[in-house]
Amino acid sequence: MKCVLYLQRAIWLGWREFAWEKVMRWIMGCVLMTAMCFGQSGSTEQEIGAQPAAKAGPVIPAGTKVALSLKQAISTKTAKEGDAVYAVTNFPVVQDDRILIPPGTYVQGKINHVQRGGHIKGRAEILIHFTSLIYPSGYTVMLPGALENVPGAEHATTKGEEGTVRQDSDTGKKIETTAKTAGAGATIGGLAGGWKGAGIGGGIGAGVGTAIGMLSRGADVRLEPGTSIEMVIQRDVPLDGKRLPRSGE
């Protein structure tokens, strides 16, 4: 009987040791798997971090000046705010031996402000902003561009950071008109009544000339088709390098 009990006890103890060994093996397996996962994760992160950053595409820098020619006439006499403006580039813009804006690229903009010359004071002004580049391939880029200069315009200059085009002062012309009218009046008065008549005629002529100057507006700003103008890019403009024309195209 005792032998049977000893045998049962030995079997039970053996089973406990076997079960405990299985548990320990399972725990060790989990620990090893976890360590391998963390090792692979860290290796992947290191590989990702070691990869070089993607190379940035070409950019038209802020402040770049672009030579343009107008495609249509613009006048403060007929222009309205919101009217479209069309121009074309005359000269390539190059950076790092690569053409960013080729000649013949279309530039579109709009008129933001129009002011006609006043009767007594105030000169004619017009403000233009450029909004897009259209490459010969049809690739279109939105941009903020302002009018920097109007070297091809007569009797007009730009003012301010936004490039408002202002007509030159015509005060001298109005004074000349008054003087001519006064001289004509004096001549007629002198022929009619001697020196006294000349004085009266001159005064009347001067008054007429002044009235003409007050009633007439100042000269309008007028930019003819083909007028050379200069656009300045107001902020960096990223480009798609794959869509830019290659050398020789």
Image (tube, helix red, strand yellow):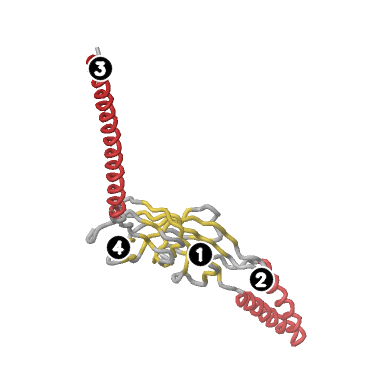
* Residue 215 sits in quarter: bottom right
Q: Earlier in the sequence, mark 2 or mark 1?
A: 2
For mark 2, what is the residue? 213
- Identified by mark 2, the residue type is Gly
Res. 231 visible in picture? no
Q: Earlier in the sequence, mark 4 or mark 1?
A: 4
Residue most extreme to the top: 1
Question: Which labelled disc corresponds to residue 186?
Answer: none
Vertical position of residue 5 compared to residue 141: above or below: above
- Identified by mark 4, the residue type is Ile
Q: Nearer the viewer, mark 3 or mark 4?
A: 3
Question: Which labelled disc corresponds to residue 99?
Answer: 4
Question: Which labelled disc corresponds to residue 222?
Answer: 1
- Identified by mark 3, the residue type is Gln
Q: Nearer the viewer, mark 1 or mark 3?
A: 3
The Cα atoms of the two marked residues, 2 and 4, are separated by 52 Å
Q: Position of residue 26 (x, y in %)?
A: 28, 32
Q: Earlier in the sequence, mark 1 or mark 3?
A: 3
